[in-house]
Amino acid sequence: MGTEGSRVVVPRNFRLLEELERGEKGIGDGTVSYGMDDADDIYMRSWTGTIIGPHNTVHEGRIYQLKLFCDEDYPDKPPTVRFQTRINMTCINQETGVVAPGLFPMLANWRREYTMEDILTSLKKEMLAPQNRKLNQPSEGNADQRMERKDLVLRCLIL
């Protein structure tokens, strides 16, 4: 009934509820999944994602855990995306695990229609890109383990 070219803007919480429902049902071939960190988070800000590394890459057989943080301006602005699991990719800050928006086209050219599922699927495709598919990868472990190792090395050097 609206004028041609008009569109309905779905409120943030309804949009996130739709994404939660979709994430709980499972996505595609099962190599990408996501859900909320805390079911009691009424603002639905903190999410966890998982990507299983694609075949015929250095990522094959690895399971990557990510954190996605949807601020109050999501979906108008992209979430912050950070790998918990250590990974070497051209669009990821090696120290923090944060996906650099300027180096990852989906975040750099964010559109309201994009979803967390789209981000995870796009990151999996990025693992297949020539510049990432054969990069040497750090030993498996998460960021907390990386920090624990750095602390241990520092303590060993001090002694």
Image: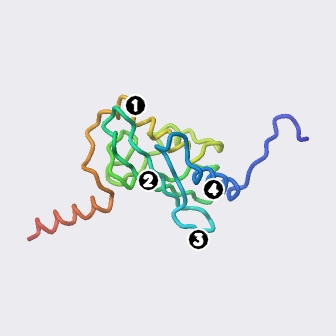
Q: Which badge, 2 or 3, is on the more N-terminal residue?
A: 3
The residue at which mark 1 appears reads as 129
Rendering coords of residue 159 (x, y %): 8, 71
Q: Residues within 10 Å of mark 2 (few under 14, many from 20)?
A: many
Q: Looking at the image, is 111 positioned above or below residue 130?
A: below
Give the label, 1 or 3, closer to the camera: 3
Rendering coords of residue 151 (x, y %): 21, 66
Q: Are marks 2 and 3 in contact (CB under 8 Å)?
A: no
Work out which residue is located at the far top of the displayed protein and give it.
130
Label 2 to label 3, Cα distance in Å? 20 Å
Residue 73 image label: 4
Q: Secondary structure at mark 1?
A: loop
Front residue of 135 and 55: 55
Classify residue 28 by image quadrant: top right
Q: Looking at the image, is 132 positioned above or below residue 46?
A: above
Label 1 to label 2, Cα distance in Å? 19 Å
Q: Which badge, 4 or 1, is on the more N-terminal residue?
A: 4
Classify residue 134 by image quadrant: top left
Q: Are marks 1 and 2 in contact (CB under 8 Å)?
A: no
The residue at which mark 2 appears reads as 66
- Amino acid tagged 3: Asp
Front residue of 10 and 94: 10
Q: Secondary structure at mark 3?
A: loop
